[in-house]
Image: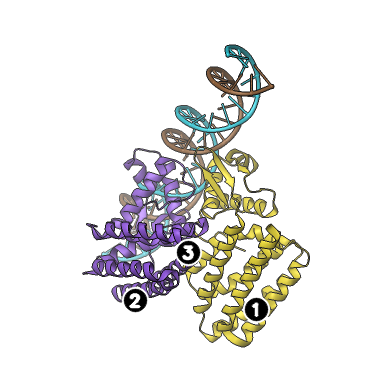
Chain colours: A purple, B yellow, C cyan, D brown
Amino acid sequence: MEYFSQSFDNALSRTIAEKLLENILSGELRPGDKVVESVYADQFNTSRSPVREAIYLLSTEGLIERVPRKGAFIKGYTIDDVRDLLDIRNHLEMLAADRIQEPHKQKTLLEEMKLVLKKMESCKSQIDYTHANYEFHFILVKFSGSPVLIEMYSKIALPLLRIQVIHFSRERMIEKSIDEHKAIYELLKNNGLDELKTILRKHTEDVIHSVRKQLL
Amino acid sequence: MEYFSQSFDNALSRTIAEKLLENILSGELRPGDKVVESVYADQFNTSRSPVREAIYLLSTEGLIERVPRKGAFIKGYTIDDVRDLLDIRNHLEMLAADRIQEPHKQKTLLEEMKLVLKKMESCKSQIDYTHANYEFHFILVKFSGSPVLIEMYSKIALPLLRIQVIHFSRERMIEKSIDEHKAIYELLKNNGLDELKTILRKHTEDVIHSVRKQLL
DNA sequence: AATATAATAATTGTATACAGTCGACCGTAT
DNA sequence: ATACGGTCGACTGTATACAATTATTATATT
């Protein structure tokens, strides 16, 4: 999955940014942890410049917080923040749904969703499943054809990834999630996009509820 | 107005980013124009490093597009993009409105709005008015108290600023806008937040309509 | 022993240097 | 005249060097 859609330059900073993201998702880097430039420069046998760019990127993606003259720190989100992120994500998805009208587009979308659903069922780890789950949701946004929506959606979704990894580590949570996404797929197949919007709303509310219960 | 909320480091890159934003708003830098690092390094008597960071920031804010090995270019938005931006902005504002429940907060909000309304009436240039207009809308978001909403709102609003400068350059458009914002203020004062949401929706639709008419 | 203070190390911010890539310009061949 | 190819220049990407600030440790003083 491509998380860093926009404005990426060279291979180096991209590689480093992806590695940092990976470390954040795995929990190796936790909220509050300091990210020192020279550490990753050594680790990748590069200079500090690309590391700096990677850190800069992740800070604009909401994963890292830069404090002047102090350094960069892994950003944490409160339960209220997560709620807001999920709410916004939901609204973006509904906006995306509005923009998918052509029947043949909807057909292609369904086909893609089916593929990703299969992938979701065969995931081995919570992290893999989190990526697949993102991919599923992203299909909708992608098919909106709106660069703006796509861009905003990635921005909102990245900070949620770590939360979701934790969320999906709950007992039987992945199975539940797969069932829900199957339902989304089926209802979408039969009733079209209007129905979809209400389902997505409910889906998001469930997730918010579940996250809240888990994190409190 | 503070447009670059998050993750800013030093004075230098901030200054440069603000100067670039200013040039974009004034129309001195237009979509497609190339932004060469050394040019602004010379202009500010600094090295390329802070300029690079400034360009990087503006690229994540959607104002500049970086193309690998090619350079940085002022980003342009199509009419469809603008529509999407306005739609998202509207949804963010409605989400913000949902989160303002305490009556005393609403009172303070109204007081602030009144002040900004006064400021809007005394603006000399379209650029000044655009800033004031942003300030007005931002009050709502600010009072939501949600860092996530605030962050996302700035991101969505920045690319709209240039469009709005153009929009407000139309004959009697500022007067019309002031009237509309006065109406928003009054209705908000009397009917509370539920009414506000429908007004904001209508306000956004008007703007979309007007922009579409102007740009086609 | 605890605290204040000074010296030192670590780290960020900025500047400069170098290398690789892209594009424009110019000449040559067809 | 136009198309192809090569050279040169401009600019980005990366590395290194220096400066300034913050954190840490050691030392001194009460």
Q: Camera-side residue: A3 or C29?
A: C29
Q: Mark 2 packing: few (<14 Cα in 10 Å), some, or many (20+)?
A: few
In this picture, residue B96 sits left or right of residue A26:
right
Q: Which numbered dot is residue A96?
A: 3
Q: Nearer the viewer, mark 3 or mark 2?
A: 3
Q: Which numbered dot is residue A209?
A: 2
Residue B182 visible from this viewpoint = yes
Give the secondary structure at mark 3: helix
Q: Quadrant of the N terminus of chain B?
A: bottom right
Determine whether B216 is above or below C30 in the image.
below
Which residue sits at x=38%, y=75%?
A202
Give the secondary structure at mark 1: helix
Compute the Cα span from label 2 to label 1: 34 Å
Q: Camera-side residue: B150 or A40?
A: B150
Determine whether C12 is above or below A121 in the image.
above
Residue extending farthest right? B171
Contact flag, marks 2 and 1 (Cβ < 8 Å)? no
Q: Chain of mark 3?
A: A
Residues tagged by mark 3 and mark 2 found on one chain of the structure? yes
Q: Nearer the viewer, mark 1 or mark 3?
A: 3
- Across and down, in percent, residue B173 comes to 74, 67
In this picture, residue A46 sits left or right of residue B29:
left
Contact flag, marks 3 and 2 (Cβ < 8 Å)? no
Which residue sits at x=62%, y=58%?
B79
Give the secondary structure at mark 2: helix
Q: Chain of mark 1?
A: B
Mark closest to the chain's N terminus, 3 or 2: 3
Tell me the amino acid under the disc marked 3: Ala
Q: Which numbered dot is residue B57?
A: none
Q: Quadrant of the C terminus of chain B?
A: bottom right
Residue at numbered disc 1: B184
Determine whether C24 is above or below A8 in the image.
above
